[in-house]
Amino acid sequence: MKKDPPVRFADVADYLARHRSQLTRHWLRAVGQRMHIRPVSRDATVRLINQLPQLFDELCALLRDAGPTDIAVRAQHDARVHATERWRQGFALDELYLELHLLHQCVQTCARDYYTLAPSPDSQTATRDTIEQFFSDVIHGAIVQWHAQHDRRVSEAFAERDLALAAQARSDARLRIAAAAAGLGIFEWDPETDAAVWENDRMYEITGQPRERGALSAREFVELVVDPGDRESLRNALNAAITSSEDFHATFRIRTVQTGTPNVLEVSGRFLPDASGSRRVLVGTMADVTNRVSAEEALRQADRRKDVFLATLAHELRNPLAPILNAAHLLRQTDRSHDQLDWLQGLVERHATHLSHLIDDLLDLSRITAGKITLRMEVFSIWSAIDRAIEINAPAAAQHAHRLEVVDSRTDPLFVRGDSTRVTQVLANLLDNAIKYTDEGGHIRLSAARDDPYVTIAVEDNGIGMDPAAIPSLFEIFEQAPTALESTRTGLGIGLSVARALIAMHGGAVSASSDGPGKGSRFVVRLPLCDAPTRASQSSDADRAATAASRRVLIVDDNHDAALSLAMILDQHEVRTANSGEVALAIAQKFNPDVVLLDLGLPDMSGYEVAKRLREFAAPSRPVLIALTGYGQPEDRRRTREAGFDYHLVKPARPEDVVSLLATAF
C-alpha cells in the first residue's frame, strides 16, 4: 500500500496552486528575457501557457497524494509531450532545457516563499529535494525524447536520401535507355581543365575513337575529329556559350578517327554545377545527323530542280503556241496558195502534237509516281516497236538533216513480253533526245542485238555529249543536262525518268554513257527476251477499218471551238453540237443520234448524268456513247465503263482515231 506523504508537502502543493498564475507570469518573463527563439504567434504563446502547467500539476500531485515512482513516470511522459510540441515549433534541446530550468527556479522560489511564512520550516529540505528530483526526471525524460526524435529524424533523412538516390538512378537509367534508342552520345566537359567524360559507348561509335584510348578532351576533339573548315566556328560557339552560360548547340562536319569517314554531328548541351558544386561543366548529347542532313540537302536539290522544271515547262508550252498563233493569223488571209496552206496545216499539227506529248509525259509522270500505270502485256517483236519509233521521229530527223542509221538484223525476231505502246514510247523518247541534242547534219544510229537472256537496243549519236559526272542524275525527276533556258534544246527533264520507270516495270533497265561534252551520247535499253507467240496476232480493227457509213452524230462539249472543229472533221456524217447537258438531251429527243461524243465536264450536269438519261429515253436502240475527257487513268476508264459508255477517248483525241472509231463502232 502507498504511504500518504506528509501533510507539509500537501500544504506546499496548495500554496503553489494558489500562486500558480503569479508563478507562470514570472516564468514567462524569465523565458522572454533569456530565450533566443520565442513563440512566433499569439496561438503559440497560448499553447505554451496551457502546456507547461501540465508539468506543474504533476508536481503538485507528487506533493499531495501520489507515489514517487508514479510521479517519475508521469513526469517523463509529460516531458516527452512537451518536448515534441516545442520541437515542432522549432526549438532546440538547449532551449528546451533552459525553459525547464527556468520553470524549476520559479517553483523553488515559490516554495521558499511558502517556508518563509510557514510555522515549521523543518520539511523545507525534503520539499526542495522532491522538487529537484521531479525536475531531474523531467529533464531526463526530455533528453531521452530528444534523442529518440533526433534518431527518427536521422532515419527519415536517410530514408529520404535513399529514395532520392533510387529515383535519380531510375531517372539516369531512363535517360540512358532513351539516349541509346535515339542513338545519342552523352558527355560531360569541364571548361577549366578541358577534361571530358564520355558516359556511353555511343560517343566512341560516333567519333570512331577506340574505347581503350579513352575520351577525347575538347581540344583533342576539335583538332583530331572536326573538319578543318568547321573548327574555328565550333571554337567560337564554345567560347560564346562559356561566357554567357547559355545552352550550347552546334552542327558541324567531322572525319572519324580511324577511317576518316565524313559525317555530320549535332551537339546540344547545358552548363550545370559539377559534383562538388564549385564550378560549372557542360553536360550534353551528341548525335550523328548525316542521314538527316543528306535528306535535307536532297530535298533542297529537288526543290531547285522543281523550280527549274516549272520555268522550263512554261518555256516549252509557250514555244509551240507562238507558231500556232502565227498560223491562225495567216489562215485568216484568203490569198494563200495550196502549198502555203499545206505548210501551215503541217505547222499547226506538228506543234499541237508536241503539246500533246508534253501533256502525256506529265500525266505519265503523275501515274508512275502514284503507282497507277497499268501495262497491257503481250508478246511482240522488238522490231515492231523500233519501226514505230522511227516512223514517229523520221520527220524531225529529216528536218534537221540527220542521217538516221538502223542496224537491221531482222533475221532474229527478238520477241519480248510487254506493253508494245509503252516500249515504243521509250524508244521514241530516246530518238527524240538524240535528234534534239545533235547538231544539223549529225548522225544517229539505232541497233538491236541479242544478249541472252536480254535484248539490247542502243541509240547513239554524235551530238553535244554529256559530262560523265552528270549522267547518274539525268534519270532523276526534273533533271536535265545543263543548257541555257533560251536554248532550243531544252526539255522538261522528265522523259528519261519516265523511260527508266517504264522499262523497270518490264524487268529491264536503261543506261547512258558519253565520252564527254562534244563527243556524243549512247543510251541502251535492256529487256528480257521471251519465246515467240504460238500464233500470229490478228490485225487490229483500226488497221482494217472500212469507210464508215454516214451516221447521226451528236457532239456534246462546253468548249465551243472544240465541238465545232470536231464537227467539221466529221463532215461526212450528219452532225449536231451542244454545249450543255440540257441542250444535248433536248436535241437527242428529236435527232435520235447513232453516236454521242460526250464531254464529262459540262457546266450544268456531269456527262455521267447525261449518259444515264440518254439510256432511259432513247429508242428503239440506244446510241453508241463515247466519253471525251482529259482523264485517262485506269480508274477513269473503269468508271465510264460502269456508267454505260462504250468507248473512252482522252483529250486531245487525234482526229484519225475518232474517224476510225466511228468506222468500227457498228
Image (cartoon, grey):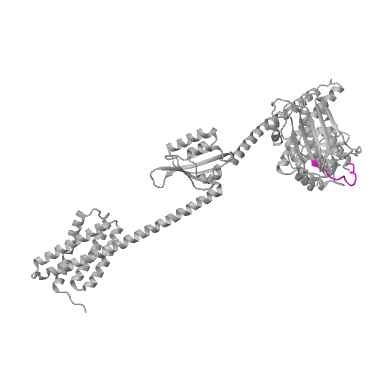
User: Residue 651 location in percent, x, y?
Assistant: 78, 37
**The magenta stretch spans residue 326:** no
User: Residue 84 location in percent, x, y?
Assistant: 30, 61
Left of 376 or right of it: where is 117? left
> What segment carries the magenta color?
527-540
Q: Quadrant of the C terminus?
A: top right
Q: Magenta-highlighted stretch: main secondary structure?
A: loop
Comparing 551 with 633, the one in front is: 633
Q: Is residue 352 visible?
A: no
User: Residue 100 location in percent, x, y?
Assistant: 22, 61
Residue found at x 21% / y 72%: 68
Task: In the displayed orientation, state which residue is furthest to the left.
Answer: 119
Q: Quadrant of the N terminus?
A: bottom left
> Residue 19's quadrant in the figure?
bottom left
Q: Is residue 455 visible?
A: yes
Task: Indicate whether 607 appears above or below 33.
Answer: above
Residue found at x 22% / y 64%: 53
